[in-house]
Image: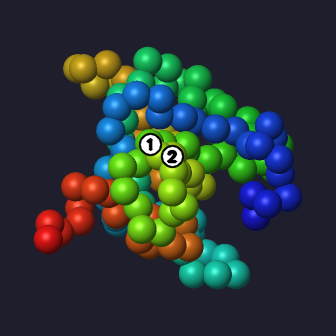
Amino acid sequence: MADKFNSDQIAYITIVEGPPPRFKPADQLWVASLAEGPVPTVVASCDMRTLNGPGLVERCRRAWAEGRPARLNYPMRHAPYAPASTRAEIEIVAARWRQVPEGQLLTLWVRTEHAEQLITDEDEPEE
């Protein structure tokens, strides 16, 4: 889907510093509709602190209203599914923010055809 868009048309949320996101299974009932499509996909969520939750959610909403994709660009340490790189991307399908005692927390729901993309270094068993 994102292949028809060039990178300046995609709404990116980029994690510049810090660890890769920890993806967790999205088990809310409404999430099933996000996985529907011509190919099987998996939906997960991740939480991250931010200084501009409302702005990041608005960036996604504006892109979706214009028919453009939103993607999370994040650091990775090791991923057998990805080319030799220190960055990865995944499609954002829903977003919300909320105020917590520590500041603002952004929750993103992401979708991928490759379930192994949701495995982080911390999730992989040690050999």
Q: Which image quarter holds the C terminus?
A: bottom left
Q: Is residue 21 above or below residue 34?
A: above
Q: Which residue is mark 2?
A: 87
Query: Residue 91 location in percent, x, y?
Result: 59, 55
Residue found 32% across the figure and 57% down from its top: 120
Query: Residue 27 location in percent, x, y?
Result: 35, 66
Q: Is residue 49 above or below residue 43?
A: above
Query: Residue 74 location in percent, x, y?
Result: 48, 43
Q: Which image quarter holds the N terminus?
A: bottom right
Q: Is residue 37 above or below residue 11?
A: below
Find numbered disc 1 in the image and state the secondary structure of the residue it sits on: strand
Q: Is residue 106 above or below residue 95?
A: above
Q: Residue furthest left?
A: 127
Q: Residue furthest front?
A: 84
Place residue 62 in its image quadrant: top right
The 10 Å Cα crowd at callout 2, few under 14, some 14 to 19, many 20 or more, is some
Residue 65 appears left or right of 55: right
CA–CA distance between discs 1 and 2? 5 Å
Q: Nearer the viewer, residue 45 or 16?
A: 16
| Mark found first going from the N terminus, 1 or 2 | 1
Label 1 is placed on what type of residue?
Pro
Query: Residue 45 location in percent, x, y?
Result: 40, 54
Q: Which residue is mark 1?
A: 75
Residue 102 appears left or right of 79: left
Check contact, mark 1 vs mark 2: CB within 8 A: yes
Place residue 123 in its image quadrant: bottom left
Label 2 is placed on what type of residue?
Arg
Does residue 119 show up?
yes
Residue 78 appears left or right of 15: left
Residue found 48% across the figure and 69% down from its top: 81
Render colour scheme = rainbow
